[in-house]
Structure formats: structure tokens, C-alpha cells
Image: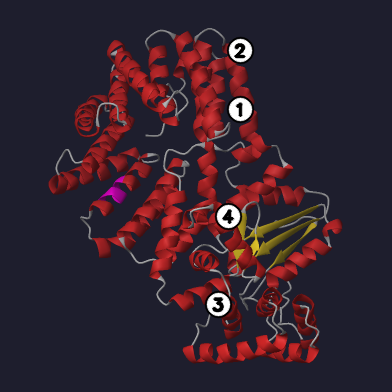
């Protein structure tokens, strides 16, 4: 059961036997969405960070490393939902131990050790030691009232130590409150022992501490960034004091880095006290929405997104199907797409549309906007299907909102991108030009979306051989972007990428090479050396380096990246194949046959 001390027992074993293992690694296994980050952190310690960053399946790669590690290791999988969820989470062989905690009583692949509540003697020792009250008889009575549940015992002892009361007084207060709570009928997912000890503690909390607890009850229980809670108060000191108050009552614990952790039973008891809890859930959602980064992601904001991902999912479970919840989940899916996970983004959005359509209506601007984003993700792997989706959206949005509505313009622009991907350059240009004009009129000529449409129109001109026209547009767009956003801004970098290719296609491969080298340095700074966009830039740089007369250096660029990719993703990876084909093209003097466009997200 929850609160019986499974995690504490696992942690105590790991700490006691640290010297028996070469590697001890703890995985919070409750949320499958965060498993990649849990295992990737291990990889970053045992392999070069450059390789660890490249790995596509961090869980598989980490377990492969463990299976081959000759020294003893311990892998702790904490709070696994059930035996089926264990699949793929630990090595099939190796010189190690796997320790799993779970509330499930199903059939497990190894020995099961049921964790029972503490016996009277151990419970009395815990209560008297922490409370510093040596009244063993009263401690025994209290231990019996608390059913020996370690979470409740710890909270009770901490309460007495913090408030200065004795165990006799606490027992009297507990019995009075317990009757109230039993009459109230608490939910089945936590015992009344936890609810009562929690209720006694909360009455002594300061208002800021209570506000923090009321808010984090709706987030994921583990690794809650304290920075997420800053908007609750006018100054950071108030927040720090509130966190200290909660810790002194054992209602939260300190997590890794600058995070806190709250037991899920304490969360359940807190939510029960709130009733429907809508106000507190909305506040948690608003805090996550404030902290969640916007596309376009940089290396720094990628980490923020990973840190918040589980909290977005958790808060969404407690919220009604309203527009604000819809917007939060749509932003989350958009960030999936920006992290180069288009299939995951499309799947999430389609599920969101199915969930929200009954309450918002099929012709809601939010639902249609989500369908547009889903089609954008589909475009990454099936442009023909995306073209059909966008053609349908343009018709619907045009009828509802008008051809020049901002949402309709997004779909018209994306329809143009589909035509471009399919080699239908004339038709694409017929879409990009009017969209650029409409966006300029509505948003201004220097708006990012206006510049994107103008740049796409220049892409079409390049593809059709109208290089002078294209380069003139690219230069104007690049100059505006640099002035508006700065030279190092990721938006400016993206708007320069096709310009660099066009310069080469127009007959100046040296200039194309130099511009790609500059942009690659900028991408390394913004997205990191092994982001997929950064990796893709090596193909274009190598191509123009070879065409400009230095195939040896081009081959060296390709081989260096290829060696890292093979080690991280395996020889069958599509990205590895692409680099192998590029390297072959350079060695055989066919560099112009390499893909002529840099990777770019729109």
C-alpha cells in the first residue's frame, strides 16, 4: 500500500550497500513519458556526453551498457505501475541486481517481498526518537492508531517535534480529528491515518506553506522545480520559508537539484480536502503554462520542457475539458514537434482533438488549430497525406473565418509547404506569395510569420531557377530578421539556412560553404552539437565544402559525424544511412547529388 515505506526501504538498501556495487542507479518509473530522461542521465555519466545525446532510445542503450558492465550494479525501479510495465526497463542479463517497488500485487518475474506496516516496537522507536518524547506507552497507543504506517508515523513525530507538544497531546488531537475524517468518508486511495496526520499538520502551517501544498497536490509528485512556484509570491524568501515549513512537518522532501517531492498520498489527502479542487488545479495549470517554453526551442528551453513534461500530464488529468486546458496540451504537443518527434506530436494532438471536440465543437477555432498542427507534424513523414489534410482545413476555415484569417493563413502556408515537398513548386509559389502579402498586412512586414512566407516563396524561386529573384528576397528577409531578432536568434538562423543553399546553387559555393559554417556554429550554440537540426547542417556544409574545391575536408566532416552516429544509433539508423550515402557521394566526386537543402523546421 502507499505510505508503507517501499521507496524508503529501497533507498535504505541502496545506501547501505553502496560499497557492494560499482554502479547504483535510481529510476522514477511511475511515468513512462519521463523514462528516457531517467536513463539518459545514466548514459551521460558512463559514456561521452556527445554519444549519450545522440542516442535515440536511451532506455535500451542504458540497459545494453549495464548488461555488458563487468562490475556489479544495482538498478532501482521505483513505483512501477504493474508487472507489464517492467517490459524493457531492465537488462535481460548482466552482473547486477534489479530492485522494483510497486503497489501492484500482480504476478512478477522474480521474488516478491510484501512490505508490511511497522511492528509496535519499531513504530515506538520511530515516534520517540523523532519526537524526542520518551513516553513509550503513549507512543505504542499512537502507533496502534496509525496502523504502523511509516508515512503517518513520520508526519506525527515531525509534528510533535516542530510544534513542541508531547505525544499525549498529539494522540488526543488525532483521535478527535480521525473521527471527523472517518465520518467524512475519505477516498479509497489513501488511508485515514495519512489524512488525519496531514490534517493536524496543515492547521499549523503558515498561509504560504498551505498555498504551496494546495498547488503541488495537482502536479506530478516527483521532481517539482521550485522555480515553477515562484509566481505564487512576490519574493523568493517567502517561497523558501514556505518550503521549509512543509519540510519541517515531513509533508515534502528535497529532491534532486532545486526540486521538491511530495508523497502521492499527501497529494490525495490534499485534493480530498479541496472537494472539486478546480481553483487549485487551475492555479497549478497556470503556473505550468507560465513556465512551459514556447517554440522555437533552444538547448536551454529543451531542458525546461523535459523538466515540466510530467507536470503538464499530471495537471491535465485533474482539469475539465475547457479552452485553457486545451491550449496547454496543444502547446505541449507543439513542443514535441519542435523536439523532432512528429509522430508523437500528431498522436497526442489527435487524442486531444477527440477529447475536446465534444465540449468545444468540431468547428471551434481551437479544434481546427489543433488539426492544423497535427497535419504539420504528419508533413514530416507523409507530405502527401498532409496535403490532403491541409486542403480540407483551408476549405473549412475559409468558409468559417475567411481566407485571410490568421488561422486560415497558417493552413494555406502549410499547404504550400506540402506542394513544395512534393516538387510542385509553381503551385507552392501561388500559395506562399498571397499568404506573405496577407500576413504583412495583418501582422506587419517585419513579423516572423511574414518573413517565413516570403522565405518559402524564395525557396520556390530557387527551385525554379530564378536565383536573382530568390537571393534578393533572402537578403531582405535575413536583414530584417537580424535587425528584429538578433544575429544569434534561432529564428534568424533558420531564415538564413535556405539562403545559404541558394547562394551555392546560383554559382558561389565558397560563399555557401562559409555561410553554412557560420550557421552551424550558431546552431551548436543554440540547440547543442547533437540536436538533429545541427546534425543535418553537417550534410549541407560538407556538400558545399566539396563543391568549393576541398573534398578531403568535406569527407573528414562527414566521417567524424558518422563515427559518432554509428556508435550512438547503430548502423541501421536512417540518419546513419544518409551520412553514409553523403560520404560516398563526396568520395566519388558526386557531391552535387547530395540533398541540396538544409534541415529546417517551419
Which comes sooner in the sequence, label 2 or label 4? 4
* Picture disc at residue 561: 1
539 shown above or below 16: above
Q: Which sits earlier in the primary sequence, circle 3 or circle 4?
A: 3
Spatial CA span between label 3 and label 2? 73 Å
Query: How far is the residue under mark 1 from the one under mark 3?
Result: 60 Å
Residue named by callout 4 = 237
Quarter of the picture holding the N terminus: bottom right
Q: Which disc is residue 159 wearing?
A: none
Residue range of the region highlighted in magenta in the rendering: 368-372
Residue 487 position in % (x across, y down): 45, 23
Towards the viewer: 572 or 547: 547
Relative to 195, is 120 on the left or the right? right
Instruction: Please give the label number shown on residue 552.
Output: 2
First reached walking from the N terminus: tag 1 or tag 2: 2
Per the model, the C-alpha gap separating discs 4 and 1 is: 47 Å
The image position of residue 377, as x and y in percent, is 38, 43
In what element is the residue under mark 3? loop
Sequence-wise, the earlier of marks 4 and 1 is 4
Query: Which mark is on residue 203?
Result: 3
Q: Is residue 60 above or below residue 452?
A: below
Q: CA distance from mark 3 to mark 4?
A: 22 Å
Residue drawn at point x = 78 percent, y = 78 percent: 132
Amino acid at each position: 500500500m502507499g505510505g508503507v515505506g517501499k521507496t524508503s526501504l529501497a533507498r535504505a538498501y541502496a545506501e547501505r550497500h553502496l560499497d557492494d556495487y560499482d554502479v547504483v542507479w535510481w529510476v522514477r518509473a511511475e511515468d513512462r513519458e519521463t523514462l528516457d530522461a531517467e536513463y539518459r542521465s545514466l548514459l551521460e555519466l558512463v559514456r561521452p556526453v556527445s554519444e549519450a545525446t545522440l542516442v535515440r532510445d536511451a532506455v535500451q542503450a542504458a540497459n545494453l551498457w549495464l548488461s555488458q558492465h563487468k562490475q556489479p550494479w544495482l538498478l532501482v525501479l521505483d513505483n512501477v505501475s504493474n508487472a507489464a510495465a517492467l517490459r524493457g526497463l531492465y537488462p535481460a542479463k548482466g552482473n547486477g541486481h534489479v530492485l522494483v517497488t510497486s503497489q501492484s500485487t500482480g504476478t512478477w518475474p522474480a521474488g516478491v517481498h510484501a512490505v508490511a506496516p511497522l511492528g509496535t516496537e519499531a513504530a515506538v522507536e520511530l515516534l520517540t526518537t523523532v519526537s524526542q518524547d520518551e513516553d513509550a506507552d503513549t507512543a505504542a497507543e499512537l502507533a496502534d492508531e496509525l496502523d504502523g504506517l511509516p508515512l503517518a508515523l513520520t508526519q506525527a513525530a515531525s509534528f510533535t517535534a516542530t510544534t513542541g507538544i508531547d505525544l499525549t497531546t498529539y494522540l488526543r488531537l488525532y483521535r478527535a480529528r480521525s473521527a471527523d475524517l472517518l465520518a467524512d468518508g475519505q477516498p479509497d486511495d489513501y488511508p485515514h491515518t495519512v489524512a488525519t496526520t496531514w490534517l493536524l499538520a496543515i492547521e499549523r502551517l503558515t498561509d504560504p506553506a498551505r498555498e504551496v501544498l494546495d498547488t503541488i497536490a495537482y502536479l506530478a509528485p516527483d521532481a517539482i522545480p521550485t522555480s515553477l512556484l515562484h509566481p505564487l509570491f512576490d519574493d523568493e524568501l517567502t517561497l523558501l520559508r514556505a518550503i521549509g515549513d512543509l519540510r519541517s512537518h515531513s509533508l515534502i522532501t528535497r529532491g534532486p537539484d532545486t526540486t521538491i517531492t511530495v508523497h502521492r498520498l499527501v497529494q490525495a489527502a490534499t485534493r480530498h480536502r479541496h472537494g472539486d479542487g478546480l481553483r487549485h488545479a487551475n492555479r497549478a495549470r497556470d503556473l505550468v503554462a507560465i513556465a512551459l517554453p514556447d517554440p522555437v526551442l533552444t538547448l536551454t528551453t529543451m531542458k525546461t520542457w523535459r523538466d515540466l513534461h510530467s507536470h503538464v500530464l499530471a495537471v491535465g488529468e485533474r482539469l475539465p475539458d475547457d479552452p485553457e486546458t486545451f491550449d496547454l496540451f496543444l502547446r505541449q504537443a507543439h513542443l514535441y514537434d519542435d523536439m523532432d518527434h512528429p509522430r508523437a506530436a500528431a498522436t497526442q494532438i489527435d487524442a486531444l482533438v477527440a477529447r475536446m471536440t465534444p465540449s468545444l465543437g468540431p468547428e471551434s477555432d481551437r479544434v481546427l488549430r489543433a488539426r492544423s498542427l497535427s497535419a504539420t507534424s504528419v508533413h514530416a513523414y507523409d507530405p502527401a497525406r498532409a496535403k490532403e489534410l491541409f486542403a480540407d482545413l483551408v476549405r473549412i476555415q475559409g468558409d468559417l473565418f475567411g481566407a485571410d484569417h490568421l488561422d486560415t493563413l497558417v493552413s494555406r502556408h502549410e499547404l504550400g509547404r506540402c506542394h513544395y515537398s512534393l516538387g510542385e513548386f509553381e503551385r507552392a509559389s501561388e500559395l506562399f506569395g498571397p499568404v506573405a502579402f496577407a500576413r504583412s498586412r495583418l501582422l506587419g512586414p517585419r513579423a516572423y510569420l511574414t518573413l517565413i512566407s516570403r522565405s518559402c516563396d524564395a525557396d520556390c524561386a530557387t527551385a525554379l531557377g530564378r536565383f536573382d529573384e530568390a537571393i534578393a528576397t533572402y537578403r531582405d528577409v535575413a536583414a530584417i530578421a537580424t535587425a528584429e531578432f538578433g544575429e544569434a536568434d534561432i529564428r534568424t538562423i533558420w531564415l538564413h539556412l535556405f539562403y545559404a543553399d541558394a547562394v551555392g546553387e546560383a554559382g558561389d559555393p565558397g560563399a555557401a560553404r562559409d555561410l553554412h559554417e557560420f550557421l552551424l556554429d550558431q546552431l551548436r550554440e543554440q540547440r547543442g552539437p547533437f540536436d538533429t537540426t545541427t546534425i543535418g547542417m553537417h550534410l549541407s556544409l560538407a556538400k558545399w565544402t566539396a563543391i568549393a574545391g576541398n573534398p578531403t575536408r568535406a569527407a573528414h566532416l562527414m566521417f567524424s559525424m558518422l563515427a559518432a552516429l554509428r556508435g550512438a544509433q547503430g548502423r541501421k539508423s536512417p540518419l546513419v544511412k544518409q551520412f553514409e550515402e553523403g560520404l560516398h557521394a563526396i568520395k566519388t566526386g558526386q557531391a552535387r547529388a547530395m540533398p541540396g537543402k538544409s534541415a529546417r523546421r517551419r
